[in-house]
Image (cartoon, rainbow, N blue to C red):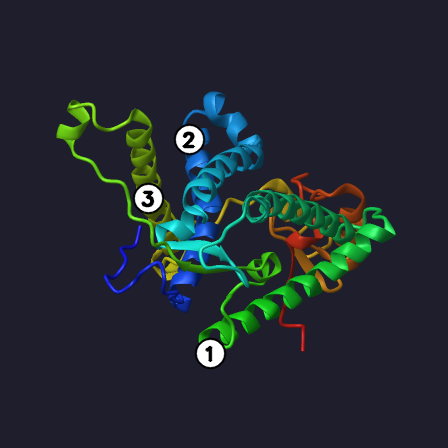
Amino acid sequence: MAAKGAHITQNEEIKPSLFEVLAADALDTTFYPAIRRVVDFLAAAKPTVFGRCVQFYDELYLLFNGLVQGYYLQRYGGSLAEVFYGLTRQSMGRSEGTFTVRERNLSFVMLVVLPYVLRKLENLITRWRDDLENGKPVSAERKALVRVMPFVKAVYESVKLVHYVSYLAGASTVHSPLLRLLRLSLTYHAEEEESWSLSEVFQGKVRIATMLSTALLRWLELSAFFLQFIEWWQTEANIGDLSKLPIPDAPELDINAAKYAGICPVCLQKPIIPTAISVSGYVYCYRCIVVHLQKESKCPVTKYPATINDLIRVYTDDDS
């Protein structure tokens, strides 16, 4: 937890910097994908033990996130990421430091329940979009939602940007539209942390609940650093220099490669608008392969699963 300066008192409201509030927001969004990578690794190592964790990861994370955020909202008046950066929530328009039970419950919904619902909705929209692209029947309501969602996201990101600029310019005391909706703002946490020594533990002067609470806080803070490291490491691994990777040898040609050389395997004519399927490499007429994939969803030659998203336009010397 970030230390407070000696000049910060409970009677003086000090506005956190934009860097601090954005860092807290970024840490909140890091937990879900970082823990997911740990779960995926465990499932790959021991699929019989951790395989179910991948299948029900969203629900398990909902439970974990609910326990953690509920504890921090109850004890410190902020989310884990906010408390990690020494911040806490307070009501706007009332006495300083006020954080009612109703506001705590609404904060819990925004921090735990809303992200879960949005992830499930995003998964549904992605599936409906794939169905649309593959020519499968989709209801009018779902089509409308698929088309509207990108605009909704754009509007929300624009509102967030306006809040950031207003907060940085000093025209607003709240940096987030969700916090504004709850009529809450962030300020520095002024409460002193509980401290104790081993001698006090052996003398029985420290309660077990206090020790467990402090240990939990330290473990979560170390976990936050660990998860941020995993996120950074994964990002660095994905950005590696592809030019340094060895070039693999071309696969050996099978019997179908000679059979369909220079012709579309569907109509058996010279390909019109040559189009390849990335999962198999075979080249077809664009119209032939699109119609086939809309019906079968697999390569006509290899029978590998494929969709329209796997098509790649092939340009030849005849193209001008």
- Residue under circle 1? 169
Give the quadrant of the C terminus.
bottom right
Residue 270 visible at all: no
Neighbor class of circle 2 (other Cα within 10 Å; few <14, some 14-19, many 20+) is some
- Helix, strand or loop under label 1: helix
Residue in view at x 21 percent, y 27 percent: 205
Q: Residue 240 at what x, y percent from top left?
A: 37, 57
Residue in view at x 61 percent, y 69 percent: 159
- Helix, strand or loop under label 3: helix
Residue in view at x 70 percent, y 65 percent: 151
Q: Amino acid at mark 2?
A: Leu
How far is the residue under mark 1 from the one under mark 3? 31 Å
Neighbor class of circle 3 (other Cα within 10 Å; few <14, some 14-19, many 20+) is some
Q: Amino acid at mark 1?
A: Ala
- Which badge, 3 or 2, comes first in the chain's sequence? 2
- Which badge, 1 or 3, comes first in the chain's sequence? 1
Question: Which image quadrant for residue 239?
Answer: bottom left
Q: Residue 154 at what x, y percent from top left?
A: 64, 67
- Helix, strand or loop under label 2: helix
- Residue under circle 3? 221
Out of 47 and 158, give the one closest to the viewer: 158
Residue in view at x 50 percent, y 75 percent: 165
Q: Which dot marks residue 320?
A: none
Q: Residue 184 at what x, y percent from top left?
A: 53, 58
How far is the residue under mark 3 from the one under mark 2? 22 Å
